[in-house]
Image (cartoon, rainbow, N blue to C red):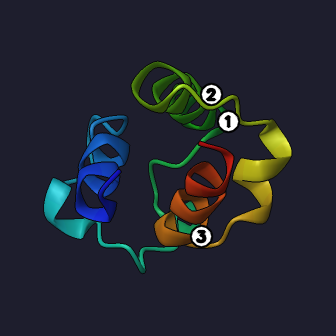
Amino acid sequence: MELNEFVAHFAEQFEETDASEFTPATKYHELDEWSSLVGLSIIAMVDEEYGVALKGNDVKSSVTIEDLFNVVKERQ
């Protein structure tokens, strides 16, 4: 699993935010488009792409995309 690939999959869950705004250091909770619905999309994407079941708290407690990537990586 590559970090840049994870960031790209993460960015695909956002419809209005330009993909160029997403980096490993992006604090995704601060994005205008962030919502609980996007959070659920991310949980579903991680399950489908990486076979890892995240919980809502995993998404809430992670600050950056890289933080969430590290959670997924630990559980693979």
* Mark 1 residue type: Ser
Question: At 62% across and 32% down in the image, what residue appears?
Answer: 52
Q: Position of residue 65 (x, y in %)?
A: 48, 64
| Front in this rendered view, residue 75 or 69 | 75
Question: Which residue in the protein does label 3 denote?
Answer: 67
> Which quadrant does the C terminus fall into?
top right
Question: Which residue in the protein does label 1 denote?
Answer: 36
Q: Nearer the viewer, mark 1 or mark 2?
A: 2
Residue at the extreme right of the image, as rendered: 57
Alpha-carbon neighbours of circle 3 within 10 Å: few (<14), some, or many (≥20)?
A: some
Residues under numbered marks 2 and 3 in contact, where contact means CB atoms less than 8 Å apart: no
Q: In whole angstroms, how far apart are the C-alphas of marks 2 and 3?
A: 17 Å
34 vs 12: above or below: below
Secondary structure type for disc 1: helix
Residues under numbered marks 1 and 2 in contact, where contact means CB atoms less than 8 Å apart: yes
Question: At 46% across and 62% down in the image, what residue appears?
Answer: 31
Q: Is residue 75 left or right of residue 60?
A: left
Q: Is residue 21 left or right of residue 69?
A: left
Q: Position of residue 17 (x, y in %)?
A: 27, 51
| Front in this rendered view, residue 39 or 24 | 24
Q: Earlier in the sequence, mark 2 or mark 3?
A: 2
Q: In whole angstroms, how far apart are the C-alphas of marks 1 and 3?
A: 18 Å
Q: Nearer the viewer, mark 2 or mark 3?
A: 3
Question: Which residue in the protein does label 2 denote?
Answer: 40
13 vs 23: above or below: above
* Mark 2 residue type: Leu
Number of numbered discs on residues: 3
Q: Earlier in the sequence, mark 1 or mark 3?
A: 1
Question: At 45% across and 48% down in the image, what residue appears?
Answer: 33
